[in-house]
Amino acid sequence: MKHTDGLTFPRLAALKHLGGFILGAGLVWTGAAAALAESKKTLEVAYAGSMGSLMEGPIKDAVAERFGIELHGRAQGSNALARLIEGETLRPDVFISVTPSPMQIVLQAGKAITAEPIAKTEMVIAYSPVGQFESRFAEAQKPGSMAWWQILEQPGIRFGRTDPSTDPQGRNIIFTLRLAAQYYSQPDLVTRVLGDVINQNQIFPEPTVLARLQAGELDASSAYRVQPAPLKLPYIRLPEAINLGSDSLAAEYAKVSMTLEGKVFHPEPLVYYAAVLKDANNPAAAENFVDWLGKDEAQEIFRRYDYDSAAGAKPLRA
């Protein structure tokens, strides 16, 4: 039996099925194209937690104005981010680490080709403006006053730091205090201030440490110099011989070490590196962003936020 237009019912059903398939495929294609177009409007950046105020403030604003795209940031300890990228749990367009080691994890995993140095910093001791030890810290650098490391030894002081297993800053405060132990001839200084290497009473996620300091939940904490000022937190700058901020003293810094989970660590220069990931969803914007970070406009923003120039530091290669 035939339909009036000459098509058999089976043929008509087949054409309807094909039409539905084409329509469905068109919808899938349209959806994929829309998702791709949307990805071009954003830039996913995973960055060291210490950069939060800079990245979510002036850098984000400048990227929107200059490139017309929205920066989506994820702040976390550099090592933890590197491991997530290595395991493909996290797939940002750009990764920014502090110190070379986390970036080397990403490079050696084949997730990026090169990483450019964009800034550097130094270790400081931040302290709470509402804590019970505020006046002592404020006087610490005056002749005849109690030294900063002596204040950190006082009974009842609440000191905060990050996890040395996942965050370079967590290791860097240990290195700083080991260098200080030599500098001030205080062999037991690290133990007296920190207790065990992994001391859960002192260890907090990096984005929360300074917030606890600001709220008065902690009296003092480790910090990079770039961190306290945006939160209006006071801090003590440390001698160049122990603050990990001098390229010329890298060999002296490296004389101290620590062993963690069977691995030996040495201090590294506190340099920030930026890399475009190979599987970036928005590679063109990622390339432009990393290139821009090294140019005058971005560097002027870095200076305003207490980041030092990374001049002299070399790019990292896979």
Image (tube, helix red, strand yellow):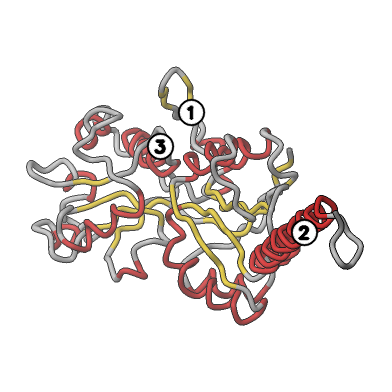
Look at the image and tell me whether residue 247 can be seen. yes
Distance, label 1 to label 2, CA atoms, is 67 Å
Residue type (three-letter) at the residue carrying disc 1: Phe
- The location of residue 290, given as percent across then percent down, is 68, 61
- The location of residue 60, given as percent across then percent down, is 53, 72
Q: Name the residue furthest right.
A: 6
Horizontal side of 298 relative to 166 (left or right) equals right
* Residue ID at (35%, 57%): 237
**Among numbered discs 3 and 1, the one appearing first in the sequence:** 3
Q: Secondary structure at mark 3?
A: helix
Q: Residue tagged by mark 1?
A: 265
**Among numbered discs 3 and 2, the one appearing first in the sequence:** 2
Q: Secondary structure at mark 1?
A: strand
Q: Name the residue furthest top.
A: 262
Horizontal side of 245 relative to 223 (left or right) equals right
- The location of residue 304, given as percent across then percent down, is 49, 74
Q: Residues within 10 Å of mark 1 (few under 14, many from 20)?
A: some
Q: Residue tagged by mark 2?
A: 16
Query: Looking at the image, which is closer to me, 234 or 64?
Result: 64
Residue 36 falls in image quadrant: bottom right
Query: Looking at the image, which is closer to me, 137 or 78?
Result: 78
Answer yes or no: do the residues labelled 3 and 1 have beta carbons within 8 Å?
A: yes
Q: Residue tagged by mark 3?
A: 171
Residue 108 falls in image quadrant: top right
Query: Looking at the image, which is closer to me, 90 or 6?
Result: 6
User: Mark 1 or mark 2: which is in front?
Assistant: 2
Residue type (three-letter) at the residue carrying disc 2: Lys
Q: Name the residue furthest front.
A: 1
Residue type (three-letter) at the residue carrying disc 3: Arg
- Quadrant where the C terminus sits is top right
Q: Residues within 10 Å of mark 3 (few under 14, many from 20)?
A: many
